[in-house]
Image (cartoon, rainbow, N blue to C red):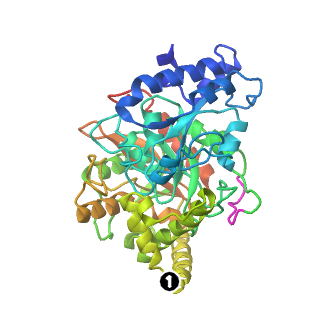
């Protein structure tokens, strides 16, 4: 019976509970069995919350929401009350740190009836989920390849059929990159769409970070963002209200859209890898056949990539984590408490000046205005590859095993289509539209104007209906 549930999306699993064809506890037990049986090969669920999940699923206190009884994993960057939380930090693992509260996103998911069965593998920072704290997360499509990062464990747990959805975060592509590398759906909302509270209003500074789930279907991504979305008191940003629930946009006619296609022209690295170009070009052809108008056009500011101060700003943001965790654990956290990549980020953060900080916001706003003008000039959606190359092999991006210069160059190749839209705050979604000759997933990205998740969901669901990926299974799956 567990295999029957494995590749049902969250909406379908919730419907079984609603019709009383299965109980919440049966869904949770099935997910636990799949994790115990399959995940030793993948290493995506690194903290188990099985007993807590069983107790909640069998309890009358389980929320009677739209996803009652559906199992979910949560990226171990985020707080779940009563469950261990390491954030990829060795010092928290040594303490066996157990969290005392739910972050707002987790609280909203619980209020909808989701049951947390475990925490998903994640690095302390970066675009690959290769860590000393948890061990490497392996791609279910090819176990010797990366799952991306930093929500890599979340993407892998969904791709392998362990859970239907998993909560991740995206500060530069960290939902979309793993979605592309694992063949699942990954939506990053507009800046301020989902709250980061109650302790963090803007975790890294600059409005980069976004919380949302990785899913197998567009309808799950839409319905769950309806649950997560909304300003909370103290949040520094607030996205404009959506005209109606995103769930109602699934299958809605998007009309004839004017779509720009950018493959990397003008960027210092040139056009993307041929596999990624093919994924985007075949998607453009499909969109054209669906009645849209696709042209080779893009905001010129995306060509230059991100200003150098962006990396410096994110590095400085990590210093805030040192202060936060030093207060919480009762001792000063030192750079040596982190893994090597984070140590280098902390060192870089200490070199950031107040002038650098001020200039960052000036540059961010100037580029944001320039990029947004492309949309106000009559464009609806930008289509790009999600990342610049197919999933690399494990070890290529490791801070301790890889050749450092090559690792940095590969990191830039991976984030060059995603990070701009964290910088400018626009919504973007990665869809699993292509698999290469090695049967590795290659995603494509759709980007809309700020606040227009509704348009993204309409187009994404149209593509999903035209070229469904639902029947594809990785080599390792439940």
Q: Residue pushed farthest bottom? A: 355
Report the front residue among 309 and 353: 353
Report the front residue among 333 and 79: 333
Magenta-colored span: 235-242
Residue 88 rendering spot, x and y as whole percentages:
46, 51
Determine the image quadrant of residue 190: bottom right
* SS majority, magenta: loop
Residue 149 rendering spot, x and y as whole percentages:
42, 50
Name the residue carrying label 1: 353
Q: Residue pushed farthest front? A: 331
**Residue at (32%, 56%) from the top-left corner?**
388
Please state, as top left, top right, bottom left or bottom right, where the C terminus lies in the image. top left
- Membership of 62 in magenta stretch: no
Say if 173 sits above or below 291 in the image: below
Residue 370 rendering spot, x and y as whole percentages:
52, 75
Say if 282 sits above or below 268 in the image: above
Determine the image quadrant of residue 247: top right
**Residue at (69%, 16%) from the top-left corner?**
19
Q: Is residue 189 left or right of residue 274?
A: right
Residue 217 rendering spot, x and y as whole percentages:
52, 35
């Amino acid at each position: 019976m567990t295999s029957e549930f494995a590749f049902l999306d969250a909406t379908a699993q919730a419907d079984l509970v609603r019709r009383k064809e299965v109980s919440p506890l049966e869904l949770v037990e099935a997910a636990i069995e799949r994790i115990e049986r399959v995940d030793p090969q993948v290493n995506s669920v690194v903290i188990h919350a099985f007993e807590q999940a069983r107790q909640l699923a069998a309890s009358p206190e389980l929320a009677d929401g739209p996803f009652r009884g559906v199992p979910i994993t949560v990226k171990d960057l985020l707080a779940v009350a009563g469950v261990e939380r390491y954030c990829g930090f060795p010092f928290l693992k040594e303490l066996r740190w157990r969290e005392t509260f739910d972050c707002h996103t987790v609280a909203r998911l619980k209020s909808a009836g989701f049951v947390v069965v475990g925490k998903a593998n994640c690095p302390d920072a970066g675009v690959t989920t290769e860590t000393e704290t948890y061990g490497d997360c392996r791609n279910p499509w090819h176990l010797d390849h990366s799952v991306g990062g930093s929500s890599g464990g979340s993407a892998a747990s969904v791709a392998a059929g362990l859970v239907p959805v998993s909560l991740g975060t995206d500060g530069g592509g960290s939902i979309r990159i793993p979605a592309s590398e694992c063949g699942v759906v990954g939506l990053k909302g507009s800046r301020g769409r989902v709250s980061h509270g109650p302790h963090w209003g803007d975790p890294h500074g600059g409005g980069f970070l976004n919380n949302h789930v990785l899913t197998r279907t567009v309808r799950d991504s839409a319905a769950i963002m309806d649950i997560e979305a909304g300003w909370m008191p103290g949040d520094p940003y607030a996205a404009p209200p959506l005209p109606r629930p995103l769930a109602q946009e699934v299958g809605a006619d998007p009309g004839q859209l004017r779509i720009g296609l950018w493959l990397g022209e003008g960027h210092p690295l040139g056009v993307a890898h041929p596999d990624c170009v093919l994924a985007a070009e075949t998607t453009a052809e499909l969109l054209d056949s669906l009645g849209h108008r696709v042209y080779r056009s893009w905001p010129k500011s995306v060509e230059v990539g991100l200003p150098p101060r962006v990396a410096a700003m994110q590095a400085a943001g990590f210093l805030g984590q040192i202060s936060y965790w030093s207060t919480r654990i009762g001792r000063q956290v030192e750079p040596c408490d982190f893994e090597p990549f984070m140590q280098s980020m902390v060192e870089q953060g200490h070199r950031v000046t107040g002038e650098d900080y001020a200039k960052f916001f000036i540059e961010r706003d100037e580029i944001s205005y320039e990029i947004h003008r492309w949309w106000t000039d009559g464009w609806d959606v930008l289509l790009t590859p999600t990342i610049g190359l197919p999933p690399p092999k494990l070890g290529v991006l490791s801070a301790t095993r890889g050749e450092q210069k090559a690792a940095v160059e590969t990191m830039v190749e991976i984030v060059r289509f995603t990070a701009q839209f964290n910088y400018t705050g626009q919504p973007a979604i990665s869809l699993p539209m292509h698999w290469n000759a090695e049967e590795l997933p290659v995603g494509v990205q759709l980007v809309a104007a700020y606040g227009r998740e509704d348009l993204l969901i309409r187009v994404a669901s149209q593509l999903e209906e035209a070229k469904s990926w639902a029947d594809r299974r990785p080599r390792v799956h439940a």
